[in-house]
Amino acid sequence: MAKIFREFTPEKLEQVRTHPYYEKARKTIIERADHYAVTDPPVMKFSKIHLYVECGNREIFERDHVEYETRMLTLFLAYLITEDEKYLSPLADIMWSICDFESWSIPAHVSEELSIEERRRNLDLCSCILGYRLSEIVYLIGDKLPALVVKRVKAEVRYRVIESFRDCAGEKRYFWLTGTNNWAAVCIAGVLCSYLYLATDEEIKEQLPRMMTIADNYLGGFEDDGCCTEGYAYWNYGFSFFCVFAKMLLDYTDGEINYFENKKVRKIAMFQQNILLNETQCLSFSDGGLDFEPYIWLSHFLKRIYPEMRLPALPRECVIDYSTAPLKQGAPIRYILWTDPDLKTRGMTPKSHIFKNAEWFLHHGEGYSLGAKAGHNKEFHNHNDVGSFLVSKGGRVTFCDPGGGEYTADYFGENRYSIFVTSGRAHSVPVINGKYQSFGKREGGVIIAEKDRFKFSMKGGYEIDTLDSLVRDFECLEDGIRLTDTFEFSECPASVAERFVSLLPIEQGDGCLICGDATLTYDKELFDTSFDSEIVSRKGGVKETVYYVDLTVKRPEKCFELIFEIK
């Protein structure tokens, strides 16, 4: 057991059982485990699986799917912490029930048109993770579980994950085999762990080159500056699983394969500390969100490898909420085994940063912060948002990029950009001839990127033949921001409107818009003003209001510029 997962030691387990830092974690895990031990999980109904086909809803079934995983992991950790055998029987029951699942994939990831065998062996985020979870439990405490449960788990993981991965080489239906986004990291971490825990050395040796190619593809999806254009939430999710992959491989090869020495991996690790707008909110481009929610365990792990890693303002105790989905933070046993009570946390002071390759800009001035992006509209988890920006003042974000919406079939389907939050309608960018930005990677590029200036072409965000040039210029002044948009058309446009978006109500002032502690001033003689809002659905079906204002140019010409100041 010493060869892999080397942080799983009697000494560390004793620390988890006794140290005050883990007191709240212990209490939460045991309370939840005691509840799970005397209650039944939800019934996995076909009608819930079929909802995705019927109406595109994926969250109702996924809540049930995730509860099984949550129960399994909570009961497992409660046993590790207490060594109380009362948790072993309900743990065996839930593991057996997971083995009963017709598919380990969720409906959004596995078509009903596939054969039953293909559905059972489908490799997606969830099936790879379940293989990893089950095999890890069997590897660590299999001698404490009923022999039949252990045999069945091994057989199911081998059939559904290990052999399925072996047999799928060259299959085109698994995009993540050649993909570069978070799926590649999550899936290959699950596959590697399943192999290391249950496969033979010969099998591992045979498949390891494929696994490393997939991990390399994932790293290739990052810009050379380490920016995760999918958004902070996907850095947390994908990169945390990549770190599990890299650490397990480091252990297995006795240090011979060490991804953490890779210069790009180091830059990716620093992404978290370079996206803060204030102490609690961060850049929310793409399907990201404003809330800065660092993984304690991941930050601790990276700090031990990279001394320059700045630790966020983490709690003085390891706090884990096992009433919610374990998928939120990816690797539950590492929540506690990768944390270090001796690490001192002072919090991170937000700092200015430019991601030159991704074309993201973050500036912290005296009493305000500005985040903006150039880029293009063909990124993973893309929104049509070239030129989108956020302003923080008074400790909260005012004008902003609203981030991602509720995940449904349409959200990732052909109708993605008819949805408000993903479209140009939900971003602080111009509306030209009544048209919003569109999907695609077209002409654009940064002109100036300095510590206090960010100037770039936005033309590539639009499919408008008469638009010859559109340049957005942010100048960071001592007391605020000057925003200048310069338009050039081959013929006079029918209409041009500047849209400004916020999650806070926007009020009309005299020649200005007031949003929280920020005030945006403009020449009121140039514009007609209209206010509107839209209620959007977030993950979990949570509703939120997005407010926006259109300043419509009264007399647009072939060439003109518009100037705004935000203080």
Image (cartoon, rainbow, N blue to C red):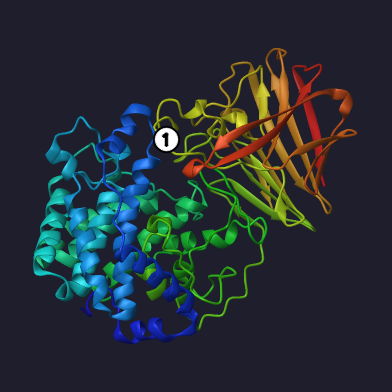
The structure residue drawn at horizontal position 23% and vertical position 68%, both measured from the top left corner, is 137
Q: Amino acid at mark 1?
A: Thr
Against 141, is 526 above or below?
A: above
Residue 45 horizontal side relative to residue 349, left or right: left
Hey, which quadrant is residue 162 in on the image? bottom left
- Residue 312, given in percent of the width and then of the height, sits at 57, 68
Residue 537 horizontal side relative to residue 502, left or right: left
Q: Nearer the viewer, residue 459 or 546?
A: 546
Residue 201 horizontal side relative to residue 400, left or right: left
| Residue underneath mark 1 | 408
The structure residue drawn at horizontal position 42% and vertical position 35%, both measured from the top left corner, is 408
Against 112, is 187 above or below?
A: below
- Residue 374, given in percent of the width and then of the height, sits at 60, 40
- Residue 151, given in percent of the width and then of the height, sits at 9, 63
Can the viewer see residue 170?
Answer: no
Q: Nearer the viewer, residue 42 or 548?
A: 42
Can the viewer see residue 220?
Answer: yes
Q: Looking at this view, name the residue that lies furthest to the front.
A: 38
The structure residue drawn at horizontal position 65% and vertical position 36%, both measured from the top left corner, is 546
Hey, which quadrant is residue 552 in on the image? top right
Against 410, is 117 above or below?
A: below
Q: Secondary structure at mark 1?
A: loop
Q: Quadrant of the N terminus?
A: bottom left
Residue 55 horizontal side relative to residue 295, left or right: left
